[in-house]
Amino acid sequence: MLHQFITLKNLLSSTRLKSTMEKGTKPPARFSKGLLQTEELYNYVLETSVYPREPEPLREIRDVTAAHPRAMMSTAPDAGQFMAMLLKLVDAKKTIEIGVFTGYSLLLTALAIPQDGKIIAIDMNREAYDIGLPVIKRAGVEHKINFIESEALPVLDQLLQDSRNDGSFDFAFVDADKVNYWNYHERLMKLLKVGGIAVYDNTLWIGSVAMPEDETPEILKAGRQATLELNKLLAGDPRVQLSHVPLGDGITICRRVY
Ligand SMILES: C[S@@+](CC[C@H](N)C(=O)[O-])C[C@H]1O[C@@H](n2cnc3c(N)ncnc32)[C@H](O)[C@@H]1O
Ligand SMILES: O=c1cc(-c2ccc(O)cc2)oc2c(O)c(O)ccc12
């Protein structure tokens, strides 16, 4: 499906962009490649500031993921670099991740937290995780990870059954089914400590949030609607300080304030 998204996106933008340019008008921003002005600019950021500083195990996990038909689902390396910064800034020790896939974001988290740090990593499908696991093992951080193969909501509800988990997490990363992000947020607002951080991925949903509904490719519509609703709810949530950052596919940082 992801493959379809990307192909569709590229197809759509290149054909529409071409016809717009043939008419001699400036292409509207929604047709630009990626979230930056040009693909070249994005590559400049990656080549200058991201790849040279990317830890070797993360490069390896990108390599082993590259052959996967849904490889583009991995967290973007620039967004990952920013997450590693946040993890260090809040001195995160106890974290939770929803949506593991082959483990790029999981490994960057495991590398950023201390030796005795812990990550509860939830994914309903273990198959992709097993592709990245040898890299995680070689990096010497597997002992920090508790991988749970499950739908995420029941796991969060189970954690909330134990009052010792209330306000105990430093950091959460959500990168799974868009329709449930608000359900995850409601639970994370109890599990995170005050000052803890939740990061939501894909909050610009491949640029579709700024497309008119009737110009949005069918395949993006459900995710676009869910993301539009989530973004509105998060922006109006007084429990969090928020920053909507245009890295990768858009990430929204929420810091619990009470
Ligand atoms: C975008 S990928 C995660 C990418 C990952 N963060 C990375 O950096 O490679 C989304 C993952 O969420 C998982 N997922 C989707 N819906 C889920 C749900 N309801 N509960 C748990 N996992 C889910 C999928 O199986 C998939 O592996
Ligand atoms: O179809 C996608 C695409 C992405 C994506 C796009 C651009 C980036 O810089 C990073 C990621 O992410 C997805 C995702 O997280 C998901 O759960 C499903 C589909 C896609």
Image (cartoon, rainbow, N blue to C red):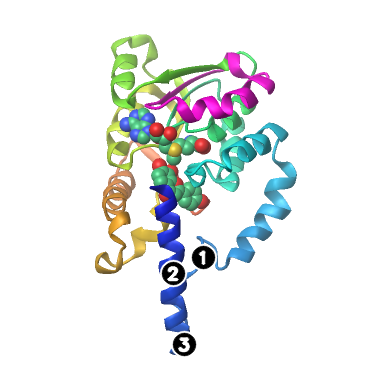
The three-letter amino acid code for the residue at tag 1 is: Lys
Report x, y in % for residue 130: 53, 25
The residue sitting at the bottom extreme is 24
Task: Classify mark 2 as within 8 Å of ligand 2 or not, answering yes or no.
Answer: no
Q: Is residue 105 above or below residue 46?
A: above
Q: Residue 13's mark?
A: 2
Q: Quadrant of the C terminus?
A: top left
Q: Earlier in the sequence, mark 1 or mark 3?
A: 3
Residue type, mark 2 in image: Ser
Residue plotted at (66% across, 56% down) = 45
Q: Amino acid at mark 3?
A: Glu
Which element carries disc 2, helix, strand or loop? helix
User: Is residue 258 in view?
Assistant: no
Left/right of residue 184 with respect to residue 198 in the rendered view: left
* Highlighted magenta segment, given as a residue range: 117-143
The residue depicted at 31 percent of the width and 40 percent of the height is: 238
Q: Which mark is residue 33?
A: 1
Find out whether the residues at labels 2 and 1 contact each other: C-beta distance under 8 Å: yes
Foreground disc of the pair 2, 1 = 2
Magenta region includes residue 125: yes
